[in-house]
Image: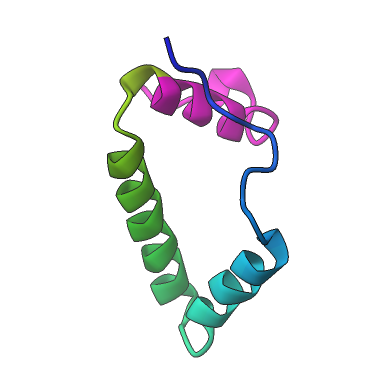
Amino acid sequence: MTTLNIETNIADPDAFYEKLIDAHNGLTDEQSHFMNAKLVLLLANHIGDASVLAEALAIARAGVAPDNDAAPQ
């Protein structure tokens, strides 16, 4: 079973962050949110492993909203 790698795994994280910020330049907030959603789905498709994706979702949501505010299934 594969688990989510949460250790730094990007060869040059600062360069990636700069490219990520640059990709948002000139976008409205709505366009920026849409681009982020597309990026998440592209990367999720690349990962492909349902258990890894579920782990990533749980970690990303932790501390963002109370558990009782979770969207209905």
Position of residue 60 relative to residue 68, above or below, is below
Q: Position of residue 64 (x, y in %)?
A: 65, 36
Judged by its main secondary structure, the magenta piece is: helix
Position of residue 39 relative to residue 43, above or below, is below
Rendered image quadrant of residue 34: bottom left
Please tell me which residue is depicted at 32% across the width and 48% down the height of the picture: 41
Q: Position of residue 46 (x, y in %)?
A: 31, 43
Q: Position of residue 51 (x, y in %)?
A: 39, 17
Q: Give, as a single range, the part of the protein colored magenta.
A: 52-72
**Number of on-image labels:** 0
Position of residue 9 relative to residue 34, above or below, is above
Nearer to us in this view, 38 or 1: 1
Rendered image quadrant of residue 17: bottom right
Nearer to us in this view, 2 or 63: 2
Q: Position of residue 63 (x, y in %)?
A: 70, 30
Whether residue 55 appears in magenta in the rendering, the answer is yes
Whether residue 43 appears in magenta in the rendering, the answer is no
Quadrant in which the N terminus appears: top left
Quadrant in which the C terminus appears: top left
Please tell me which residue is depicted at 63% across the width and 43% down the height of the picture: 9
Please tell me which residue is depicted at 56% across the width and 81% down the height of the picture: 22
